[in-house]
Amino acid sequence: MPTAAAHITPIEARKRLWRTVLLMGVIVVMAGPVLYYISYRIEASRIAAEVKEKDPDRDPNLPLPDPEVSPTPMRWVIGAGSVIMVIGALGLATVAGIILMLRRSLRQHALSTLITVVSVGLATGLLMSVFSIRKQTHDAFTSGATGFDAVLGARGSSLQLILSSVFHLETSPGNMPWSAYVAIKADPRVKLAIPFATGDNYKGFRIVGTDLAFFREYSFGKDRKLKMVDGTAAAAFFNEDGTLKTTLADHAGHRIPRSPMAQEAVLGSIAARQAGLRHGDKFNTYHGLTYIETEKHSTEFTVVGVLEPTNTPIDRVIWIPIEGYFHMAGHEPVDKTGRKIAIDWTDPASDDYRQVSAVMLRFIRPSMGQSLEMQINRQGTVYTLAWPIGKIMAELFDKIGWANLVLAFVAYLVAIVAGAGIMASIYNTMNERRREFAILRALGASRGTVFAAIVSESMAIAALGVALGFVIYGALVAYAAVEIRNRAGVVLDVTAYHDALLFAPLGMIGLGALAGLVPAYKAYSTDVATNLVPAS
Amino acid sequence: MPVLQIKNLLKSFATPDGKSHRVIDVPSFELAAGQHIGLRGESGSGKTTLLNLIAGILTPDAGSIRVDGVDIATLKESGRDRARAANIGYIFQTFNLLHGYTALENVELAMRFGNGVDHARAAALLQRVGLADRMKYRPAQLSTGQQQRVAVARALANKPKLVLADEPTGNLDFRRASEALALIREVCGECGAALMLVSHDREILSAFETVRDISDINRLAQESVSN
């Protein structure tokens, strides 16, 4: 006589196979964090042994350096496990007829499904964007890819100094005499010192006077030099043999006298595009950092070149020779009575009338900033050395961290509302579907199959929303990237990986599964006989 | 070996006032493999309850129900679901087709819960019941008679040993009911399935060689009706 245990249909055997695949996926996913933890412990033990070997007398109560274990292998393991899980779940769902039920249900309730998918998409896109853009912005402003180690400026806020001179976003804390630039440039710890003089704009793009070192020696990112759109580096300022073409003078030695050619400008790519200036165009400068038409200077500058995009704040600046800045109409030195003073700019004594807003510095070794910072900030009272730039910017992000928390809170709320939306949209169909569940049960579908069908439906809505969420995320990040680049010259790495890109979608699908539990239970507990046919 | 063996089957329901009301008491009943039987009974005589017990949709209070040798009364719910899907075809009075699905999908879905999808067999069954050109139609796009034929095809999808039919012609006029009954019997005969068809219509049941009154099987049938 056949027994229940022996009564395994071919379809049941296939279900068992897919269940095994699903279980394997779960095990692999769980193995990821376990492997990471084991690697972490091994690395911690290795560090402890290494420290002990180097310094046997070290106080054992002192904290050890944190082990650095790459999370990438863990992510790959979790990713592989997730793929196996998805294959197992899809196989199981297909065999059990859940995919067919799912398709039909989504089609039958297309409108409510669409609305829910959009809300989940918005929630997922928002979650990923909030965390990813925050990280990308943080990295862009603090990575130190600006090419400078420190900034010397007038006594004031380090942050203001950095924002005004590195990111060209703020007003300068004040000016310093030329002698400050000469002194810091001569400091043996300083490898590169570039003077910046600011205070004027054209159509809101700030005009910065600088010297040749900026074009000749300055590099940013991975040793990238400034290049002109037409090819050669700083072609507007140099002859092919490397000699100066114009009067963008090296004023430390006053080797080159001023000439009318000092009224020329090289434009950052964004400034050129948005201000509508091209090679050969002439423009007048305007006093201040805000564009006010009545503040026009009479001095006219000629565009002699446009820089290739650097994806740094440099792109938003109009660069002129620092001598051109000093000689600009309206910048003439005045005496106490307000009368203009006639200056012989070729006379070394004229340095007394030259001022700089900031001196951009690169040290022989970045760590040398520490002693200089001590000397200038703690022992001195006249100037400020903003060092290290990345750390000071990171402190800014720490200060505005509450704003990110609020944004994240809003994103979480939207996600919860979207999850509730999934539950409501499915739950509302439960009454009309009781008979359907009863028929499915009568055909042989188990309670588990009906339960899984509803949870799958809920997860499928969430998954569709997640797919839409990636589109919304892409659009939001692209928009943010364009806006931030236009406003700050800083470029976000829109392709950068952030854990939110993994956890937000998984979280939303998990939330979808949770949201499906209540309606799924209702489907699970549907009484077949009552809902199938009227009792005789 | 009989395809269906019932012994000492008891079933009660709770009444709204909390009392227990027994509606089924079947001391013994057997149905041979391939046998067709007509079961006559009035409304409220426990016909549907008996079929639901045999199908494993309801669980008995006592007794055994062996379908193809397996006592489904002792199985857990999931086991009963599997046994029902694999061995029992059920034709309902109201057909109970799934309205979001095509005729073909209705048949194939039953196969998924049973012995696995056999697309060719599903199509052949629909062809056999005269719906070769209506496979992609949804129930709402089919006539009542066509819907019933889909229900017949679906009941036979998993090559069941036993087909239960609960007033399958109740919604049809006499001519169509007779045609439908003939079709059910023909197809069950071709598949070698035993058929247990319950109806209150004596004329319909006259087509069966074996017709029994429900009260001959269920000792409480008369009482149930009078109650």
Image (spheres, rainbow, N blue to C red):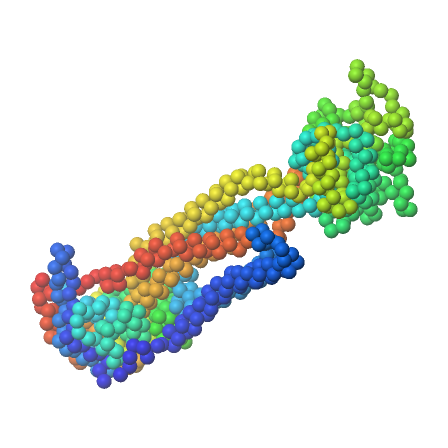
Q: In which quarter of the image is residue B100?
A: bottom left
Expressed as whole percent of the image width and height from the top left, the position of residue A419 reads: 42, 50
Q: In which quarter of the image is residue A355?
A: top right
Compared to A475, does B139 lie above or below?
below
Front in this rendered view, residue B176 or A228: A228
What residue is drawn where x is 75% and y is 34%? A358
Determine if residue A419 is in view.
yes
Front in this rendered view, residue B98 or A184: A184
In this rendering, the count of numbered labels is 0
What residue is drawn where x is 89% and y is 35%? A253
In the picture, the quarter occupied by the C terminus of chain A is bottom left
What residue is drawn where x is 83% and y is 38%? A186
In the picture, the quarter occupied by the N terminus of chain A is bottom left
Q: Quadrant of residue A151?
A: top right
Expressed as whole percent of the image width and height from the top left, the position of residue A465 reads: 48, 53
The answer to whether residue B9 is left or right of residue A226 is left
Determine if residue A300 is in view.
no
What residue is drawn where x is 46% and y is 53%? A508
Expressed as whole percent of the image width and height from the top left, the position of residue A458 reads: 41, 56
Residue that protrudes farthest toward the top in the picture: A337
Front in this rendered view, residue B169 or A161: A161
